[in-house]
Amino acid sequence: MIWVAIALLATVSLAPLAWSLRASAGARGRREAALALHRGQLAELERDLADGRLGPGEHESAVLEVQRRLLAAASDADSAPASGRRWPLYVALAVVPLLAFGLYLVGGSPWLPSVPLAERLADEQQQKAEETRLIDTLRMRLTLMDQHSDQAREGYILLGNAEAGRGNLMAAAAAWRTALQSRFDPMLAAEVGEAVTETSGHVTDEAAALFRRALAESPPDAPWRQMAEKRLSEVGK
């Protein structure tokens, strides 16, 4: 099935180029076009003379001028067929699909079987269940540690990162808040303030206090300072 899709994509991508070659295959050179134009002008002059729109003198002068242009166009050396200048496009039509196929073989895995949607969903559910089990195990072990130890502090930061990765900002803020109780860290305080703000939908009093203290105790080049200052500017709005 993948090969059919690849062939269809290649056909759709190269169709405009192929059509342009087909449309230009029957086009005439500038010499032939000029000859046809001047012959048409002669025929138009004859009709104007017959209808009385041109007098005999004007007609004769105009015919002589057109005939002069006709002779000049007939001697034009620009009669090379346009197909001779289209060979790079023909080469591209053949080479581009081959190059694309080669790149796919290098970077793709065409020999791997496709995975049904139900199986992929089941794998995702299994991965989420495994993540939940690991997080629950970490949370249980943390309750058995000294809450003021550096090991517990690092564990709560890890727990908060895991919960934030799952989009559970409320649980992430709770874990980071516990880590802050052991030792204050400006960046971690800003993360707690941002998580609380995202969860509440506005800058709470707790978040504002965390942002202010984080800014007061952080270096001036801290990368998160602009975010904290922006959040404080939203207080009271």
Image (cartoon, helix red, strand yellow):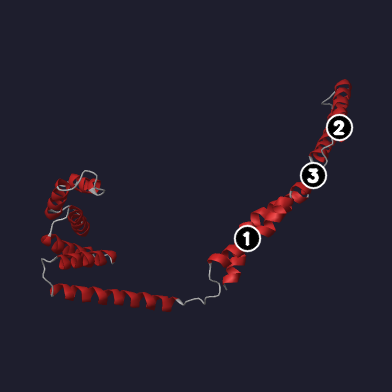
Rounded to the nearest angstrom, the CA distance separating label 2 from label 1 is 48 Å
Q: Which corner quadrant of the image does residue 74 belong to?
A: top right
**Which amino acid, mark 3?**
Arg
Place of residue 190 in the rendered image (x, y in percent of width and height, measured from the top left): 19, 53
- Whether 232 is drawn above or below 135: the answer is above
Place of residue 213 in the rendered image (x, y in percent of width and height, measured from the top left): 13, 49
Q: Earlier in the sequence, mark 2 or mark 3?
A: 3
Place of residue 161 in the rendered image (x, y in percent of width and height, measured from the top left): 25, 64
Residue at mark 3: 28
**From the image, which quarter does the N terminus lie in?**
bottom right
Q: Which mark is residue 42?
A: none
Pointers 2 and 3 in contact (C-beta within 8 Å)? no
For residue 165, side relative to residue 229 (left or right): right
Residue at mark 2: 70
Rounded to the nearest angstrom, the CA distance separating label 2 from label 3 is 16 Å
**Which amino acid, mark 2?**
Leu
Q: Say which of 171 and 29 sits in front.
A: 171
Eye-nearest disc, 2 or 1? 1
**Which amino acid, mark 1?**
Leu
Residue at mark 1: 99
